Image (cartoon, rainbow, N blue to C red):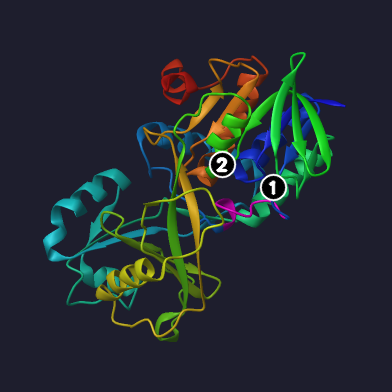
Amino acid sequence: MTHDFLIIGGGIAGLSAAAELAPLGATLVLEAEAHPAHHASGRSAALYEPRYGLPPVVELSLASRNGFDALRGMLLPRGLMVVARADQRAEFDRDLTGFMLKEIAPEAARSIVPILNPGTVAFAAIADHAWDIDTDLLIQTHIKRLRAAGGTLRCNARVSAITRQGGVWQITTPAGVESARILINAAGAWADQIAGMAGVVPKGITPYRRSMARIPAPGGQDVSGWPMIFGCGESWYAKPDAGALIVSPAEEDRAAPHDAWADDMVLAEGLARYEEMVTEPVTRMIANWAGLRSFSPDRVPVIGRDPGQPDFFWLAGQGGYGFQTSPAIAGLVADLLADRPTAFSAALLAQLAPDRFR
């Protein structure tokens, strides 16, 4: 069987696009791991903050709100707080503008997050336009939509070779060879490797590690109503999660594509930055992990047909914005591959287009 659309990568990008494409033609998703969303998608901070990122990313994130609302139950109120030391006023002001925050007195911030340290937190700001994303529910919803439209998700299907014969892609996996008319590269950190296999010029998609630690609720507090908290300039962040707290150093360390793990020293340094701003020390970690956030050279996603091979479609470089942009991007992918009008401007399409990298 020759599929109309074959997507390499079963993370949020690949699965959300597959759910939109399956009604348009025979769709197959190949995921290298035993379960979908194993790598970056399964290790996301899972926040929808539509003003987070560069302007093209913000446009995609804002456009995604209707998609989240249509799926129902995917977004839960969280809110966002930024805190800063006395010597960080300039960085704090940039965050105020960038995130569209409202500055509040440190005392007011402590009424929301009681563990904030009065000796170090000199400035604070807050906004309510941030929501938790139910990532598990979102992934499973896309899989159900894919299958309901006759599409297939195949796990343990690592691609080992890609050739092109008679205008059709031939993709080799452990289960055999799959054929497809359109090949969609949603391979995350491995996107450039997949391009190379297909004889397509890579676009400089580079993975960067980000580490996280889950710690017990500080001082036994009920953290469920706390906002996500950022050190200004995104020097660290903390987010309530299932009665505990996730803390990240928010690092960006370049890495090769791999099943990432947290760097102990980087994690310790990040936890120290967090501890400086709170009154409760970190006494132990419940767990730690890392994920790879993959960026293009200009840090804007790469979405569209390859200029040298139009039947090779790029869906890569989402960085840390994959979940929050996924409804809009999935719709855009379907529009582009169906050659139908899209709601997005020509200017945005040019900013996303693969031909900007030659």
Q: Quadrant of residue 21?
A: top right
Q: Is residue 183 above or below residue 106?
A: above
Point 77% across, 13% down: residue: 166
Q: Looking at the picture, how far across and down is residue 298, in whole percent? A: 36, 32
Q: Quadrant of residue 4?
A: top right
43 relative position to 1: left or right: left
Q: Looking at the picture, how far across and down is residue 217, in whole percent? A: 45, 79
Dominant SS in magenta: loop
Q: Looking at the picture, how far across and down is residue 180, in whole percent? A: 76, 25
Q: Marks 1 and 2, Cα distance to the nearest angstrom?
A: 11 Å
Point 64% across, 15% down: residue: 340
Return the residue at label 2: 190
Residue 181 appears in the rendering: yes
Residue 230 appears in the rendering: no
- Whether residues under marks 1 and 2 lie with C-beta atoms below 8 angstroms apart, the answer is yes
Pointer 1 or 2: first along the chain? 1
In the image, which residues are magenta? 35-42
Q: Amino acid at mark 2?
A: Trp
- Extreme residue in the left direction: 87
Point 50% across, 34% down: residue: 63
Return the residue at label 1: 32
